[in-house]
Amino acid sequence: MTLREMSLYAGLALAALAAACSSDDDDVINPSPEPEPEPEPEPAADAGEEPAPPPVQEVNCFSAAADRMVVIDQLAFMPAETSMPEGGVVQWMNEDSVDHTVTSGREDQGGEGEAFDSGVLAPGDMYCLEFTGSGQFPYHCEFHPETMNNGMVSVSAGVAGPD
Ligand SMILES: [Cu+2]
């Protein structure tokens, strides 16, 4: 065996060894790529879906011009029915000798006070609401659900009708 042959054999042996090693190291040399983490789903963009503003909001009776007046006296809302276009302000005045409330809903239907609730209106107190959306707004007195009449505010859409 010549020196050249010996170096050739050695080279082959090294190559074989390297091949054997490389097969073991395949996983390390070429690790299977980690799966990309799924991107967090973007929260559904509720574009243009602003929550509708509440159709009723309390306003200061001293700065708001009332379009309709409801007097509370002798255990009654007078008038019981109030109608107006949207954007109108209703003012309640307790001219009775006892406390009352102006509370949305009906005593027996649940959800009372969700749209509006004056809290205690002592004799002489006022309560004002601006109705910015159309609809039917029943209300009652929380203290006298049985003895007082129920009230209703009917707000029509502010579309100019044919005169
Ligand atoms: Cu009452």
Image: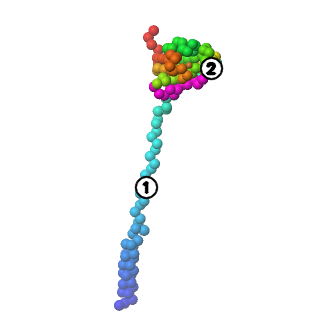
Disc 2 target residue: 122
Residue kind at label 1, given as amino acid type: Glu
> Crowdedness of circle 2 by 10 Å Cα count: few (<14), some, many (20+)?
some
Spatial CA distance of label 1 from label 2 is 67 Å
Residue 58: give its label: none
- Asked whether the beta carbons under mark 1 and mark 2 sit within 8 Å of each other, the answer is no
**Quarter of the rendered image showing ligand 1:** top right
- In the image shown, does 83 or 18 lie closer to the viewer? 83
Picture quarter with the N terminus: bottom left
Residue 17 visible in this rendered orientation of the protein: yes
Which residue is at 49% across, 31% downward?
Answer: 51
Picture quarter with the C terminus: top left
Disc 1 target residue: 36
Image coords of residue 154 (percent x, y)? 48, 17
Disc with the residue nearer the chain's start (1 vs 2): 1
Q: Is residue 63 left or right of residue 35?
A: right
Which residue is at 43% across, 55% downward?
Answer: 36
